[in-house]
Amino acid sequence: FDEVAAETDRQNPIAGPKDPYGKRLATLAKGLNSHDGLTLDIKAYLVKDVNAFAMGNGTIRVFAGLMDQFTDDEIRYVIGHEIGHVKAGHSKKRMQTALRASALQKGAGATGGTVGRLASSQLGDLFNKVVVAQHSQKNENEADDYAMNFMKTKGYEPVAAATALEKLAAMEGDKKNPLQFLSTHPSPGARAKRMRAQLV
């Protein structure tokens, strides 16, 4: 995960501490360098896509395009959702499966059981298999439930969990500019209804 994160950071511009996106995210993620037993590394990519992702080592990246569309508390929901994925070990299990299914495992065995330095092409392939791949309804629901609890316990506005997903549902219906990542995620509209049910 450290190598994959370093490679994706190399390929995408990161918002620095003086950048408006970097400042905003630093404020929203204040106090979250560690949370729930996890060490987290939360940064913004200066990329226009509406997206975010997490990796098993606590890397969380939020895209500027998402920040443009979401309120502060909606971004906090996204952060909570991504922490939920890390806490539940979703990407860790995918990484284990991807490594077992690849030739990389053979190389690992030959070097004493540790995966050696991976080439950029291999890192990109792992990123696609582990981070970009199809998300199950179960995994997304677990991460959403974690995020709702995160919002409530942190004193953030929990309705933002629903409104963020409702915004994604509206974007999903935009035929001219569809969100690519939604093709690998369960319906945001159905997830929004689950979140609203938890507000009662």
Image (cartoon, helix red, strand yellow):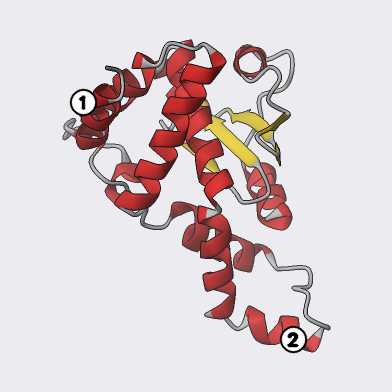
Residue 94: percent from left, percent from top: 51, 63
At 51% from the left edge and 45% from the top edge, which residue is drawn? 85
Nearer the camera: disc 1 or disc 2: 2
Residue 65 appears in the rendering = no
The disc labelled 2 sits on which kind of residue? Gly
Residue at the (51%, 25%) spot, across then down: 150
Tell me the SS state at disc 1: helix
Q: State the mark number for residue 170.
A: 1
90 or 52, nearer to the observer: 90
Residue at x 40%, y 35% (from the top left corner): 145
The residue identified by callout 2 is: 109
Please give left or right for residue 183 compared with residue 127 in the image.
left
Instruction: Measuring from the top left, give residue 66's x and y in whole percent.
Output: 44, 25
Graded by Cα atoms within 10 Å as few (under 14), some (14 to 19) or many (20 or more), the crowding at tag 1 reads few
Quadrant in the picture for the N terminus? bottom right
Q: Is residue 4 shown to the viewer in this render? A: yes
